[in-house]
Amino acid sequence: MAQAQLGAVPHAHRRLNGEISVADQPGRFAWYELLTMDVAAAGEFYRKTVGWGVKDESTPELPYTVLRSGSVPLGGLMEIPEEGRRLGATPRWMGYIAVDDLNGTAAQVGRLGGAILVPPTVTNIGRIAVVADPHKATFGLIEEPAYGGGKPGRLDAPGRVGWHELLAVDRTVVFDFYSELFGWQKADAQTDPADWYQLFSAGGQTVGGMLTKLPSVEQPSWLHYFNVEDIGAATKQVNAGGGRVLQGPIELPDGCWIARCVDPQGALFALQGARGPTGIEPSSASEIGWSAKWGGTASQGRMVLPKLKR
């Protein structure tokens, strides 16, 4: 069987640092949301794998579970609505980027060649919109996040979201979209001008990278990396909890280890951290791609694994 590849491994994958409240910084990722089939099971999986605190903060109008890294709320869990399931929606993670002017930013998405999938609306987490870049990778916009008032913690601490990676149709083209929309800058130019991995910064801090995806990745999408203390222990927990390690753990030049994974319900995510005393198990997985639709919107969650050749 073919070796799993979501894209090659970045040459310079930088971990975040510094005590910055992302929710108060326009242009930064401020919230993360998992749409899933089983909130209780998903909460337990990520509690054991990443170490998040899980708390039901539902209202009569909306069932909602909040994830916390220590005392810092960073994301939420909610079930995919029945209508969405009928239309083929599958579990996936989505990151929300903070903006000062939601209406204006959403309109600019359209002017720059993107699409507005969910227009600006008031929700339990703040005013939000769901949009797509010109290559159809989806992400959220959020204005005045409801959970943005907590004391900021270090972004490289265990349990935080430490990296954001865009698997694009052509990262050299789509970068201009995000730069114009959020003011993102290219960071740490690679030694080879033709290098396929482009780091980017938001507010002067390197927060992620963009790469041109492999053909095996059907749908352009954002991949979020969750910090863990021991990459070996975390990946073992992924497997023990019913998920799969699709690629890695892989050691990067800066000594950090990464692994790309899928949870038991099919949502794609990644882990990054140090190699601890637990040791590391080699992964074995088939080549993957993912795609699904919900009212014309790519869900970016469902893993499509080809049948093995015997």
Image (spheres, rainbow, N blue to C red):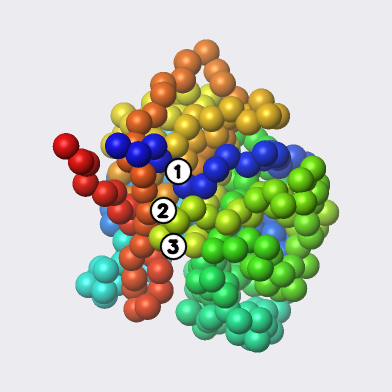
Mark 3 closeness class: few <14, some 14–19, many ≥20 residues within 10 Å:
many
Amino acid residing under circle 1: Gln
Q: Position of residue 35 (x, y in %)?
A: 38, 60
**Position of the C terminus by quadrant:** top left
What type is the residue that disc 2 sits on? Ser
- Quadrant (top left, top right, bottom left, bottom right) of the N terminus: top left
Q: Position of residue 180 (x, y in %)?
A: 74, 73
Position in image of residue 181 (x %, y %): 71, 73
> In the image, is residue 204 above or below residue 260?
below
Label 2, on which residue?
A: 216
**223 with respect to 217 (left or right):** right
Q: Which residue is mark 3?
A: 219
Q: For residue 127, which quarter of the picture?
A: bottom right
Q: Using the rendered image of the protein, determine whether residue 156 is visible from the camera's viewpoint.
A: yes
Q: SS at mark 1?
A: loop
**Residue carrying label 1:** 5
Instruction: Decide: few, some or many residues near mark 2? Use Cα within 10 Å; few <14, some 14-19, many ≥20.
Output: some
Q: Nearer the viewer, residue 169 or 304?
A: 169
Which residue is pictured at 66% across the width and 68% down the height?
173
Q: Nearer the viewer, mark 3 or mark 2?
A: 2
Amino acid type, mark 3: Gln
- Could you give the CA–CA distance between mark 3 and mark 2, rounded to whole angstroms? 9 Å
Q: Nearer the viewer, residue 209 or 266?
A: 209
